[in-house]
Amino acid sequence: MRNLRKWLLIFTTICLILPLSGCWDRKEVNELALVMAEAIDLTPDNRVLVSAQVAIPSRVGGAQTGLSGGSGGKSFFMISATGRSVSEADTNVQKKLPRQLYLPHLRIILIGDQMAKTGMMDILDHFGRNPPNRLRTAILVAKDSDAQSLLNTTYPLESLSGEAIRKLERQLTGSNTTLMDFMIQSASEGSDQMASAIDIRPAQESPGTDSSDTGGTNGSTGDSSSQGEESEDTEPAFSFDHCAVFRNLKLVGYLNPDDTMLLEWMLGRLKYTVLTMQVPKTGKTISVDLTQAHRRVRTQVRGNQVSVQYQLSGAAMLLENQTGLDADDPEVLKTFQTAVNAYAVRAAQHCLNTLSKQLDADPTGVGLMIYRQHPYDWERLKDNWHHIFQTVHFTVHANVRIVEGGKSGPPIYEKTHRGIRGEGASGNSKDEEMSSIGGSR
Amino acid sequence: MRPYRRMKRPKSIIPEVRLPDPVPEAGDLLDKALEVKEKQLRETFANCSDVVFRHIVCPDAVGQGIRMLITYVDGLVDTKHLDEAVLQVLMRQPLPPAPAVTAAWVQEILADRAVPAAQVGVVTTYDEVVAFVLKGSVTMCVDGDEAALTLSVVGWKQRGIEEPPSEPVIRGPREGFVESLRTNTAMVRRRIRSPKLKMQTFTIGEFTKTDVVLAYVDGIAEPSVVEEARRRIQRIDIDAVLESAFLEEFIEDSPKSPFPQVQSTERPDVVSANLLEGRFAIFTDGTPFALVAPVVFWGALNANEDYYERTFMSSFLRILRITFMLVSLLLPSVYVAMATFQQEMIPTTLLMSISAARESTPFPAVIEALFMEIVFEALREAGVRMPKQIGQAMSIVGALVIGQAAVEAGIISAPMVIVVSFTGIASFTFPRYNFGIAIRLLRFPMLILSGIFGIYGIAIGIVILVIHLVSLRSFGVPYFTPVGPMHFQDFRDVFIRVPRWAMRYRGGMTAKQNTIRIPAGQQPGPQQDKE
């Protein structure tokens, strides 16, 4: 009895103490403003402009409102404020919001071109220090544009444009460059940073406009802002193929699509891509589907002379063959293979040249490789690395195997000799058919 | 002086009041004269209209006849059998010749030679006579002898043996215990045909005088445990035993625990299996539920059918049950914790739909969850108590109310309905009803904890729960065995069930002296030549 009373007393005391502290940090989901994406820009007067893309849950989730999708309401709204730092801007954004700014579900951070050029240090500190921010947040750069306008566009397939950007990168490269990746790159010895760049193009490209796929290194400026206000029949769409290269956390330039792909390959991040190249002597192109991309790097240091050898490898499947040659023929396949490898070597050299000679930035981590492979030499080289990097001698070998010629050997539309020879003995032709199928395996 | 002392009440000085003994002349020896005996008995059974007194005169060799008084309770006795097998014999044929009725006459003549009944006994006191009459025996008091004959011609109406509704099986024996003690013990005896199966009878209850049988297998069961059980049963001083639960609450180790430390079952196969694992069983007259102890936490997640189905299915079901036990205990609180404190743990897309659904709901998630859980429990309780015909209609109304209307009216959010119904389904997966009740109850403190502290509160709750469980004992056996104190040998029958031939050992805590259950090397397979 006494025992029971004692426990009762303890229980009552606990129950009474609990509300006394007055700190109940309960917050219902409908008291939160879920920030799905944040755009960070630099205003002309050097203040940080933070634009938060806040989801409107009843428009995004909820099957009840599923039918009213045609009403055309945006499923997010943008709210922005400026401040001297990201945190101050966040606080100022909060002042405009009746709900608590909720950052843990932030999926992407979009950095404006100007902001990135000025330097990423403040941003990285904010996102690395403030607990609600997650390191898995994807970080992207708005190519030649301010981030806010990019985030403001609606995207037809995804209800949230930030989500569309994130998925776009993920879909194309298999993973997102997260804040963590970026920080690892910036914290590691002898490596510069890179992030995916995003810009806006019309969703439908008319035959009249020339494609900017083969554009130069720095792309054409003002491309996205002009096409943001396209006529209504061509909705704007995000396009992801460039990559932003930083040096010492400052944006120095963009790589064109081919260089971007090769950079990924040389970083060992490439999972899947489609390569299109000309086959020598035919003047026609083939397309291959590259998987299992690997790379091997070896560095050599002799005095101040550094040479780097890249060994690229992978497996490819023939996707398209404009040459009209029989892909079942091992000789032809060998030709194709040589073409693919030559293309890879050429493109890699171009990429490395752009990086070392033009941008003088080292996102491939050549310095990191030297640090790992020649730690004593690195001590000597590191202070002067950015000068030495320009003189690094790159050699690239490619060893891509074409493992499969697709569904048919020669172009399937082509009339083969089989019909003529088959007139004599149908049994023979069948045998040949069988053997040709067997050969393609 | 500590402050709480002041709240103490002075101890009650009123002594415990007990009703006077219903048989006042307890222990008195029977008188010789039949008239005195009849008067005494009639006084005892005053106003008991169901007690029958019947005078007969048996012809004897001398010819003057011997007067007898037959007393029994109408309805408890098979009167047809009494007429045919006893009265006819006694009244038609003369009794075997004997000297006049003297002291040992009842024993020598009546019991040994004259009355053709299987179970007879000789009693010499009034309260014994009364006890036997009330038990359903027929007592015969003879003029001139101080002893009375009791014969068992019990014949009250019994329920037939049916499949136990509380523990149905797909495969397995379909008979269940009934309300009669002897039928139940016979069902077990039929399964364990060994003299090692011991059954000790106790009579408990001031008024009910209920027969209680303690059964165990000598040589398997731990003698100290059986001795402890015997001691606890004998210690019980109670007015009535109407169900085995009356005993359970007296013999369990920790009455303040929500977890049952004694298993109750309606199935003779379950009782037999437990006896053979070194546990003991307690049968109570008047109820089909037998008690089995000592039991452990993990045993509550085993169904008897686990042993009748193939091992893969049984193992799968066990893991399923453990999972759903956790779901049943934690799902509403985890949902509440995540929706009100740790929103960052919810996947973004899911958070969107939860957020959308909760946009217009008026109550906080905790209140919503508590409300829904209570409504669900009420529905369930009503479903059990309602007459079957109404139950149907009510469940439809209930499903509509909590399922659809509440969501459409914007009072409850749709994810909450999913969570609560999922929890409801999970709580039906317990093979043992009384264990499920414990989990159902603990859901509410968990919910409140998570509503106050979030995931942290759930962690506190789980820690407290585990501390409680590992400190709990059932008849000296730690409740969390074989996980609490590790017994790797017993792991063959906890999370998975190994095939029978691999279940070589009996439970390590309950059968210490007879551990080998099955000799090794009986795994079926191609015949191998052994030299």
Image (cartoon, coloured by chain):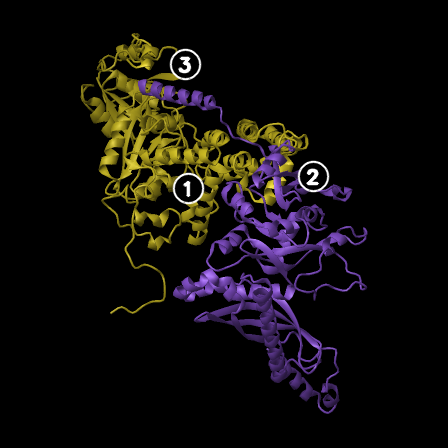
Chain colours: A purple, B yellow
Count residues near mark 3 (Cα–Cα under 10 Å), then give few for <14, some for 14-19, many for 20+: few
Q: Position of residue B475 (x, y in %)?
A: 29, 34
Residue depicted at 63% across the width and 27% down the height: B362
Q: Where is residue B330 in the image (x, y as percent from the top left)?
A: 48, 37
User: Which is more toward the observer, A286 or B406?
Assistant: A286
User: Which is more toward the observer, B488 or A395?
Assistant: A395
Quarter the C terminus of chain A occupies:
bottom right
Which quadrant of the structure image shows residue B479? Answer: top left
What separation in Å lies between label 2 and label 1 (alpha carbons)?
40 Å
Q: Are marks 2 and 1 in contact (CB under 8 Å)?
A: no
Given this view, does label 3 or label 1 mark the residue nearer the observer? 1
Count residues near mark 2 (Cα–Cα under 10 Å), then give few for <14, some for 14-19, many for 20+: few
**Chain letter of the residue carrying label 2:** A
> For the residue labelled by badge 1, is the local secondary structure a helix, a strand or a loop?
helix
Give residue A64's mark.
2
User: B267 above or below B244?
Assistant: below
Amino acid tagged 1: Leu
Q: Which of marks 3 and 1 is nearer the N terminus?
A: 3
Which quadrant of the structure image shows residue B55? Answer: top left
Residue that carries the numbered disc 1 in the rendered image: B301
Residue depicted at 68% across the width and 32% down the height: B408
Q: Is residue A6 visible?
A: yes
Which quadrant of the structure image shows residue A29? Answer: top right
Q: Do the residues labelled 3 and 2 touch (CB within 8 Å)?
A: no
> For the residue labelled by badge 3, is the local secondary structure a helix, a strand or a loop?
loop
Quarter the N terminus of chain A occupies:
top left
Residue that carries the numbered disc 3 in the rendered image: B49
User: Which is more toward the observer, A57 or B97?
Assistant: A57
